[in-house]
Amino acid sequence: MSRLRVCAIFAVNGLFIGVWAGLLPSLRDHFRTDARGIAVLLMVAGICAVIAMQIAGRWADRRGAKKITLAAVPVMAIGMCAVAAAPSYGVLVAAAAVFGVGNGMMDVAMNAVGVHVEARHKRPTMSLFHAFFSIGALAGAGIVLASAVLTGGLRAVIVVSSLASVVIAVAGTMAVAKRLPQSQVTTASMSGPRRIPAAAWLLGIIALCFGMTEGTAMDWSSIHVTDVTNVSPGIGALGVVCVSGAMIIVRLSGDPLCARFGRTAIVRGGAIVAAAGFTVTVISDDLPVVLAAWLVVGLGVGIINPQIYAVAGHLGGGRTLAVVVGFGYTAFLIGPAIIGSLIAVVGIQNAMLLPVGLAVVVVILALWMPTAGPAKGGQRKRDVHGREQHAPISR
């Protein structure tokens, strides 16, 4: 039952993110901004999230991740309400800052809870939790799509989608709050060294690269579909629907795959698939082909995130997890802002070459990726400094 409650919390976070990502084309058009304006919006949210998660990671080790997770939900809700009420672009940026703070707090804390539950069950479960994040994101994108069909006007789409996400998210959180697992993230955070493990920095670099690819998929897929295939913003939201749907499929399969092949192989395979999907987004402007390409991207990026965060949490608890998630969020939220600036110079299709290259870098760096926590039977395990241990991991 504890796993189901953690799944619900991940779904709540995904719902907020799905609505946010799905609304980007409508926000752009309603506030009459461009790619640079969206880039600023994403950068502000990203900076605030990265700062918040460093504080949240330390609090999660000291006070337990449950409290931080539950405190983050109303912060995100306030940010989303502010998006709905924003009368100007300046107020929208401020709303994005509040939303980013809540998202940063919630992301690191809920992953810390997930790592604890995985350690307690002694088998991979992080992909399942992240699958429910994607289910929530898909539902959020679906809310935007339904609002576009039923209301038509840009302002109505923004208000209805934002407020619907707040009501659903708050109700869902209240339903599971009392019995959400109450603990510190891992035993490593209590009995291990206080310093950040050396291997965490390699994980951070990998997170930096995959964060750019996943962030691009979540934040730019809807705008890419809208602009490249010349469809309305409502139809363009199908881009993030495709990404989220594919991520659900691959994450629901991720834990058995991890148990069979090991986390390193899963990360490398996911990066290769993502690179292939992004390559198609560069060369095609046909709607079915572009949507299929984003499906492929979702299959690739969806499997990487849970593995990296799980290893980080098992290696060094909330502080290490916060560092690695911080690297990922620097790319996940600020990276798409860089993509936005690049789009203004070279166009949205050519800009997709950057995540192609970063996915290739992930393939290479994963060769030295440390492992920790439940993984493939017989796979060699690396210590907190990234050195290989020679005792096989028990099944």
Image (cartoon, rainbow, N blue to C red):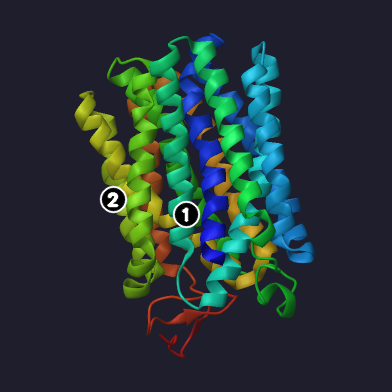
Depicted 168 relative to depicted 54: above or below: above
* Image coordinates for residue 167, horizontal then vertical, percent: 60, 33
Place residue 2 in its image quadrant.
Answer: bottom right
Q: Secondary structure at mark 1?
A: helix
Q: Residue at x 52, y 76 (%)?
A: 121
Q: Residue at x 40, y 85 (%)?
A: 395
Is residue 47 left or right of 220 when viewed as pictured? right
Depicted 26 relative to depicted 275: above or below: above
Is residue 101 visible in the rendered image? The answer is no
Please, what is the three-letter code of the amino acid marked with disc 2?
A: Val
Front residue of 87/146: it is 146
The first of marks 1 and 2 along the sequence is 1
Is residue 322 visible in the rendered image? The answer is yes
Is residue 226 left or right of 140 when viewed as pictured? left
Is residue 170 left or right of 20 when viewed as pictured? right
The residue wearing badge 2 is: 273
Q: Residue at x 49, y 71 (%)?
A: 370
Q: Residues within 10 Å of mark 2 (few under 14, many from 20)?
A: some
* Image coordinates for residue 300, horizontal then vertical, percent: 33, 50
* Image coordinates for residue 385, horizontal then vertical, percent: 59, 75
Q: Secondary structure at mark 2?
A: helix
Front position among marks 1 and 2 = 1
Q: Residues within 10 Å of mark 1 (few under 14, many from 20)?
A: many
Q: Residue at x 70, y 68 (%)?
A: 183
Q: Which mark is residue 130?
A: 1
Please, what is the three-letter code of the amino acid marked with disc 1?
A: His
